[in-house]
Every structure is written in structure tokens, then in C-alpha cells.
Image: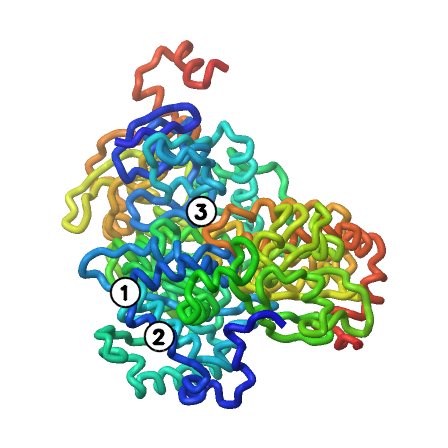
Amino acid sequence: MGKQLLLEHINVPGLARLDVYRANGGYKALEKALKMKPEEVVEEVKKSGLRGRGGAGFPTGMKWSFLAKPEGVPRHLVCNADESEPGTFKDRFLMQHNPHVLVEGMILSSFALGANTSYIYIRGELLYVYHILEKAIAEAYAAGLLGKNILGSGFDLDLYVHPGAGAYICGEETALIESLEGKRGNPRIKPPFPAVSGVWSRPTVVNNVETIAATVPIINMGGEEYAKIGIGKSTGTKLISACGHINKPGVYEIELGLPVEEFIYSEQYCGGIRNGKKLKAVVAGGSSVPILPTELILKTAKGEPRLMSYESLADGGFATGTMLGSGGFIVMDETASVVKNLWNFTRFYHHESCGQCSPCREGTGWMEKVLHRILDGHGKQSDVDLLWDIQSKIDGKTICPLGDAAAWPVASAIRHFRAEFEEYIKNPSSIKDEKHYYNVRNEKAPVA
Amino acid sequence: MPKVTIDGHEIEVPKGTTILQAARMIGPEVAPPAMCYYTKLKTSGGYCRTCIVKVTKGSAQNPNPMPKPVASCRTEVMDGMEVVNFTSPEVLEARKGVVEFLLINHPLDCPVCDQAGECHLQDLGYEHGAAKTRYDFERRTFEKIDIGDKIQLHMTRCILCYRCVKTADQITDGRVHGVINRGDVAEISTYIENAIDNDFSGNVIDVCPVGALTDKTFRFKSRVWFTKPVDAHRHCDKCSGKVRLWFKGSEVLRVTARKDQWGEVEDWICNTCRFDKKQLSDWTVEGPSRIDRHSVISQGHYELAKLKLDTGKKLKELHGGK
């Protein structure tokens, strides 16, 4: 097992309680940070090479340094806990079992950014986690870790948890900000970016849960030490939520740079493919990143072993690569149907499109209908090209990345598994024989 | 002042000008079509994506091209920026895609739609779309809703441009209508079908690019190209009173605001002028309206009378030498 930074004490009973968290070294980073200057904290995060864990992988230190600092205007830090991508459940796990690491990260990040009011925007469905966080925050207030003059440093911070209403689109930072302001969760048109005009038109930084939590070990061990973990520009550890046809689904903390093959087959992690089947495909970073077949996920097109890192997974571009994304690792064995799985993803994006801009509003529904027709046994050979054309007209033409997220899985499934689409269209009876699929309406449960 | 080059035409524009505005300053030959952007409405634009263009050079300082096509209506020009619109096959293809998306759930009931003839979606489809659709599923439909006694909302035709929402928000007091639901079932609606009761509510009809919001006093009276537009004014204490009257014979069939070259209203008008003043005696007529000669409405032949043309020669010119 590699280095464990966020999940180190995850098995300690009662870690969600403040006393237990402190007994295991909690809030040491905060004490250390409050003795530093805010700029020094930012500098440490820059040195650590930490990159956004929400999906895009943008360097966090750089994002922080973009924050506008006009005189007399309050700034805000918002934690994006609206984790709703199919296949990703790392933030929920972290918040549920170790809420104080997020609270501590929020306090020290707010200190670094000079924010006196910060928010955790949590997905509406995670109401039980909301209560856990509320309890953790109440404990922190009682212990003088939040509120006025934190630990005698003169720094004030109020931290609020705001539950959303369960919209995937609110995970997009500007839609999140709209929703936080009490409006309809529609993405804003950028520019202006949140760093200049975010919540209530004030400069705002929006960071993923894991990103903010990662600042705690960074301050504890120092940015340079943290940068030694991982590989190249992918520094530190990453939470991966593994699911699908594997022996041990769950949330794992890995050192970036771990070979994909080791992650899937090693007993420490996924423990290999269920029932001794063969690996067929992997969606490496949550539903929106391109799906890759076995030969491309284990090795890059150049024949080098593929590693769990931002660069290695993206090697080859979208033609032969994918993205680390948010770390939702979905494994499919040889019995899985890529087309059915794709339909399920597309149905999700159709349902979650906000309806502001036309390519995404109309295109996601169209793709879902075409895929449904194929699975219904009424597909036409031209449907594959039609799907390809629709996705190409959504990709990159929308206000926010939801359009891209809806287009990429379709593009990659056709790119790597075109034959499967054509087989379904040519021979509709092959669909009925399929036993392994999941979440398909009006069908029998999968046979293990 | 920043200089921007659009399709090879260079222009110097004030700081803060968007690409679309700069293109309109050059002229219609480079101006991208816009279905949701409206100069008079703040924060409008960015939704329909028909105005997307490609920025091949970001600015003089940062000459890199922008990675994705941008909505020209919401992107400000930078000094030294280079933009391609009609000269880029990629942009034309992307725009064709947008038109197709806008049309897949549109009923195409132009033969019975009052907007036909002055519909921006018709123009857009004709100029930038494909001749055939590839969409063969059932189209989305809605029931017609009356918004007050003068305006009808037919959501089936709506392209969700948000113009009426912004109009109601910015021109009228106490907005009661907006967007409910999301994705492809999102719809414009009044709060629990409340009637819009406001002196300026009629302007939502003028800003609607399609036939989703129509004037109930004009519905099914006449095709627009059989009516003759004239500019007229009256003294009005609520609005400017500058309107366009649409005649059939000596009867005023409807009153609208005057629209400019880009199909945008010049002055907002009040409901009294729009719905209640349908007598010629209410108005002082200024003269025939200038209508783009490409519009079907211009078959009223005012151009000829107005310009006192030498018929044979000028007619030829007028019709592009054909």
C-alpha cells in the first residue's frame, strides 16, 4: 500500500468526532498555518504541485493566486461537494468518515485566501453527510476553531454548509454559485470568472472537497515533501472510487503514478476482475471521461504501461487516451455491454442538462433516443454515424463542460467499440441474450 | 481603442465591444446571426450558440487561438484579435449543427404560424441550416397558454432564447414569468400561469424570435406579407409613441414597435399603443417603413415608390441584376 494521507486513520472508530480526530494529529496543520503568513500558505500549496481533484486537474496554487483582491471587498472560499458524477463517490466517503479533515482544510484555505465567510455546497442527496458536517462544524465552533479569533490568531471565519437540491449541473462552479445565491442553478457565461466575480459578485475560489482536504497534509509535511509523492507533475495522493466488475469495489487512496494494471489486479486495491472474467473496458475518471478498451487502458498506444496520473492517462489525447477526471474508476468485464452502459450515461446527461444552451439541451436528448432505439432493436446502420455527428456538434460548443461531458463518452464508445454498435443493429436478437447490464429499466436484475 | 479583424475586415471599436457588435459595425456580410442576443437587454445572449465564431488569434499580447468556438455576442474584443466567421467551414458546420438542434423540437407549423414571414428561425434555417432533418422521433409539444388576455404563449415553438424573460425582468415591474423545469423539458411559464399584468408586457411579443409569443388581437387575421407597414407616432405619456402600423386596406391590423436592421426594436412601446389604438385617426403617419428587400414583407413595393426609380433599370439593380 502506498502512502495514506487522507485515509490514514479512516479505520479509527469515531474519527468523525473532534476529540478522536485531534488525538490522531488533527488540526495540527491549522495551528501551523495560523502561525504563518497567508501568502506563505499559498506558497506551500504552490510548491506542493497540488492539482484540482474535481476533474479538470488545474494547479490549485495557481488558481488561488488568480483570486482578485480588491480593497474592501470580501472574498469567499466555496467547497464543491456536489459530487454527482456516475461512478464517483470519493468525496462522499471522505466527508462521511473524516469530516474534520475537510473542516480543517476549509479553515486553513480560507486563512490563506483571506476569506472570512466560506461555504461547503453539498449535493442534496447527501443529506446524511450534511448532518455529519453540521455536527463537525458545531464541534469546531465549540472548540474555538471557527468563529472569532481562531486559536488566538485574530483570524475570523464563519463556515456554512449549504445543501443543493440534487442537480448534477450545480457541480459546475458558476451554476453552483448561482444555486448558492438562491437562484436557479444555471451556469453563468464566462468571463467574468469566479476569481473576479463569484458569489454575490465577490472574488471567489471554488475547490473540490479532496483538493481542500489535501491542503492539510501539505501544510503538515510541507509543500516540497508533498511534491515528492507521485510522479512528475502529478503530485501527491488521489482518492479513487473503484466500482464495476471487480472483486473489491471501494474508495482507495493511491499515490499518483501507480500502474493501472496493478490497481486493477493487485490484492491491495481492486483485487482483479470478478468471477475470473476478462477485462473488457475501463472508464477511468467518472462517467464523462472517454472509455478505453483493455489494450489501451493497461498500456498506452506507444506500448508503455499506463499509470494512474494526469499525464499518463491523457497520453495519446482522446484518440487513444482518456483523463484522470474525478477518479471514478468503472471497470467492465467481458460480459458488459458498452452500448447499454453508454445509453445509461447518456440518459443521465439528458436528465441533468440545464436547458440553457441549445446544443446540450436538444443534443443530449437526441443521443439518448437514438441509443434507446438501437437497444430496442430498431436501430439503423446510419445511427452510428448520426451519433458521432451529434456528439461532434455538442463538443466544445456549449456554455459549460456538461456538453463536453455528454459528448465524450459517446465519441469514445464509437471510436473503440463501433463493432458492438453495428452488431446490435445488424442482429437485434443479440441484445436480448445479453445478461449483464445494470440500471436498465424494465429488465431483470443482472445474474452474477 | 482595440482593433479587431473579422473575416479579413479590420475595424477599430470602443473597449468593451463584443465580437458580434463589432461585426455588425462592419456590416451584415460578416455579422453572425443571433437568436437570443438582444442589444437592449442586459445579460442577454450566449444561450442559442448560433453566433459562434472562431478566434484564430486571441490578441496582440497573446496571439494563441482560443481552443473552442466562442459565442460572439458575449465575448469582448481584444486588441489585435482575429476572428473568422463566414470564411471558416468549421464555423459554418458548427452553426449548421446549432440550427439543426434548434429545429429538432420545433413544430415547423409555419403555414399556420403568425410569425411566418418575419420569423428569425425561418431566416436562420434558410440561410444556415440543412434542407432535411435527421430527427425522426416524436417532437416535444405543449398546450397553449394565455398570458393575460392579449398574449398567447405557444411553448411548442419556443427555442428558449430567454429574451422574453429578460424583457419582463428589465422593462416591466414585478416579473411573474420565467423558466421552469430543466433540460429539454424546460419551458417559459408564468408563475402558476399568472397573467402578466403590466403596461409594457406586450414587448415580449416583439422580442420573441419565433412564433411562441403572439399578439392575440392579430392572430390569424392575415399573413404578414399581405399587410403594409408604415411608421407612425402619437403622443403617449407612457412610451415614446413611435410605432409601426400594419395595414390591410385601410384597416390597422396590428401595431408593433419599430425594428432596426437586425430585427431588434428601436423603442419599447406600451400596451395601450400596441393593443388599443387600432384606428388610423389615433396616429400621425410618417411614411412607409423601410423593410429589408430580402424580406417577404417588402413585396409591398414601397422601395420603388419611395426612391422614385427609373423602373426598368433600377428594378434590375434592385433584384441583383436578374
Mark on residue A273? none
Mark 1 neighbour class, 10 Å CA radius: few under 14, some 14 to 19, many 20 or more? few
Foreground tag (2 vs 3):
2
**Residue type at tag 1:** Lys
Provide the secondary structure element on which disc 2 rests.
Answer: helix
Mark on residue A37? 1
Q: Is residue B290 left or right of residue A14?
A: left
Query: Where does label 3 land, which residue?
Result: B210
Depth check: give the residue in front, A402 or B31.
A402
Instruction: Report in which chain the residue with disc 2 lies.
Output: A
**Residue type at tag 2:** Leu
Work out which quarter of the rendered image holds the N terminus of chain B and state it: top left
Instruction: Report in which chain the residue with disc 1 lies.
Output: A
Residue A300: x %, y % from top left: 69, 50
Depth check: give the residue in front, B99 or A56.
A56
For the question of whether residue B190 can be seen, the reply is no
* Sequence-earlier tag: 1 or 2: 2
Q: Residue at x 54, y 66 (%)?
A: A237
Seen in the picture, residue A243 relative to B75 is either above or below; the reply is below
Is label 1 on the same chain as label 2?
yes
Q: Is residue B90 left or right of residue A376?
A: left
Provide the secondary structure element on which disc 1 rests.
Answer: loop
Provide the secondary structure element on which disc 3 rests.
Answer: loop
Residue A16: x %, y % from top left: 46, 85
Total residue callouts: 3
